Amino acid sequence: MYLSTEKIKTDIQQIDWLQLYQQRLASVKDDRLTSFYKAGTFAPDTPIKAIPFVAVDFETTGFDPKRDGIVSIGLVPFDLQRIHCKGAKHWIVRPRTTLDKDSVVVHGITHSDIKSAPDMMRIVEYLLKALEGRIVVVHHRGIERPFLNAALEKRINEGIVFPVVDTMELEARLHRAKPLTLWQRFRGHTLPSIRLVDSRERYHLPYYRQHHALTDALATAELFLAQVSHRFSEDTPIRELWK
């Protein structure tokens, strides 16, 4: 049975990704999506030492994928042995929505920056090729996957789904497993931050400029490698990490 995007949102942990890729391969019409799904994904018991990853970060005009758009994309391929900086990519793209002044303050991409930038459809083939056959790693899966899906739906009437490893969610497992008690809240205790910059600090990783898509992608790759080194194993099956 074909799984809709909405169904995927509610049952994300129960998805058989191998089966879903085969279903999508049989149904998509766009050649770029056909190539993406044909490359396949990994069996859930595959150890992470055998998996090629790609860290991805988007800067956007806001937080609503239905209303807002992507303004920059950064990606960095890596595996557990090393980060492949030579394969890193960064694009500024022109969104089909107005830049919000608050988002400009955050990511620093202005109207003049996007004036001559290409629409995302000009680079989508290169983007999907960079994701093919890899597991995507992000910091907060509520951005990259839904925004890419929405961008494609708007342009070619076909969306995209894929498993992701979310470094923010991995931090939440450790630092948000138990809510604060009433007494702790009364005493002014707060839960540890699981933002990218604060999570990196806990692993003694260097400070990088925030909200630049390529730098944040690199920062996410480094954070994931630190998480694996401290809390997981090279033999950890991917099913324990992806969503």
Image (cartoon, grey):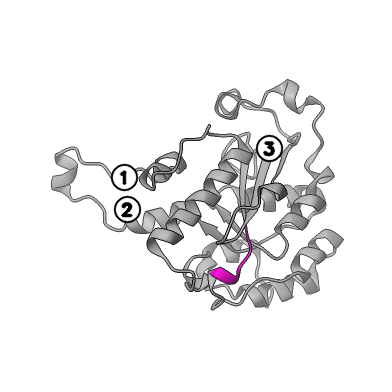
Instruction: Rate crowding at label 2 as few (under 14), some (14 to 19) or many (20 or more) other CA atoms within 10 Å.
Output: some
Which is more N-terminal, label 3 or label 1? Answer: 3
Residue picked out by circle 2: 175
Q: Quadrant of residue 52?
A: bottom right
Question: What residue lies at 54% left-to-right and 66% top-to-bottom?
Answer: 12
User: What is the CA distance from the residue labelled 2 to the residue labelled 1?
Assistant: 6 Å
In this figure, which residue is indicated by the disc labeled 1?
Answer: 192
Q: Can see residue 30?
A: no
User: Quadrant of the rendered structure where residue 233 is?
Assistant: bottom left
In the image, residue 40 lies at what x, y percent? 71, 71
Q: Position of residue 100 (x, y in %)?
A: 62, 27
Q: Is residue 156 above or below residue 185?
A: below
Q: Secondary structure at mark 1?
A: loop
Can residue 170 be seen in the rendering of this structure?
Answer: yes
Element under disc 2: helix
Which residue reaches farthest front? Answer: 81
Q: What amino acid type is highlighted by mark number 1?
A: Pro
In the rendered structure, which segment of residues is drawn in magenta?
49-53
- For the residues labelled 1 and 3, the Cα–Cα distance comes to 29 Å
Question: Is 109 in front, or is 236?
Answer: 236
Q: Name which quarter of the figure residue 216 lies in.
A: top right
- Tag 2 near tag 1, CB within 8 Å: yes
The residue that appears at 70% across and 66% down in the rendered structure is: 133
Q: Is residue 65 magenta?
A: no
The relative height of residue 33 versus residue 16 in the rendered view (above or below) is above
In this picture, residue 12 sits left or right of residue 199: right
Number of numbered tags placed on the structure image? 3
> Where is the N terminus found, in terms of image quarters?
bottom right
- The residue beneath circle 3 is 72
